[in-house]
Image: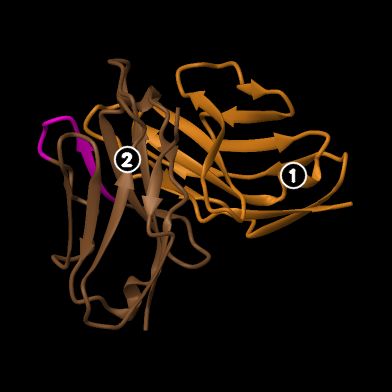
Chain colours: A orange, B brown
Amino acid sequence: AQTVTQSQPEMSVQEAETVTLSCTYDTSESDYYLFWYKQPPSRQMILVIRQEAYKQQNATENRFSVNFQKAAKSFSLKISDSQLGDAAMYFCAYRSANNAGNMLTFGGGTRLMVKP
Amino acid sequence: GAGVSQSPSNKVTEKGKDVELRCDPISGHTALYWYRQSLGQGLEFLIYFQGNSAPDKSGLPSDRFSAERTGGSVSTLTIQRTQQEDSAVYLCASSLLTGLPSGADTQYFGPGTRLTVL
């Protein structure tokens, strides 16, 4: 079974600064997908960014980018130019590329606080 | 169009009572998922529906939990004889499943139902 670990329960960043959230995972599969979801106080999970394991290039979405290290099984999220609206819980998630494994496996989350 | 909706938003019940939680997926989405989020923790998979196929129930924690999906759309998660440890936020998600490898499919989440068992 796959596991996802987020070692930082809480992180804090100054507005306009850059912050990196860590995520590691354990799997025996070679093909899979990794995600970062944001959960604001409204509870609704919002997809931030997605990475296909077979792609070497790191995914980027505006101010959000990932550092995907497949050999190290590491998938960190970098938020540049942090904004107050970025404050939320962030969850890293894994999904198998095997059609029988459709569910997401989540890490325990990191609470990000943004200081004005 | 509208996103995934869930009702009720909050539910308070007494230990031993049955509860039903409802999920309306995005129109046209063939896949539907239920997850549970206990206080301060990540999401835990419960059950997955895909079209007319038999659901994947591998995440249900006990036989007190069941779910159905009628007409390939709305889903109801039922918890019988609720216990205090059932208190959590129950999140529903749906995805399109276009024929791409399923892992490529983005899951869209609803706002969840916060269940409190007294």
Side of A94 where B83 appears, left or right: left
In the rendered image, residue A21 lying in the magenta stretch gets the answer no
Q: Tell me how far mark 1 sits from mark 2, CA to CA.
A: 28 Å
For residue B106, which quarter of the picture?
Answer: top left
Disc sitting over residue A103 in the figure = 2
Side of A20 where B60 appears, left or right: left
Above or below residue B34? Residue B19 is below
Residue B4 at x, y percent in the picture:
40, 40
Above or below residue A2? Residue B52 is above
Looking at the rendered structure, the secondary structure element under dot 1 is: helix
In the rendered image, residue B53 lying in the magenta stretch gets the answer yes
Residue of label 1: A85
Q: Is residue A1 among what the camera can see? A: no
Estimate how packed mark 1 is, as few (under 14), some (14 to 19) or many (20 or more) residues with alpha carbons within 10 Å. few
Q: Could you tell me how many numbered marks the image carries?
A: 2
Tell me the magenta residue range: B46-54
Side of B65 where B41 appears, left or right: right
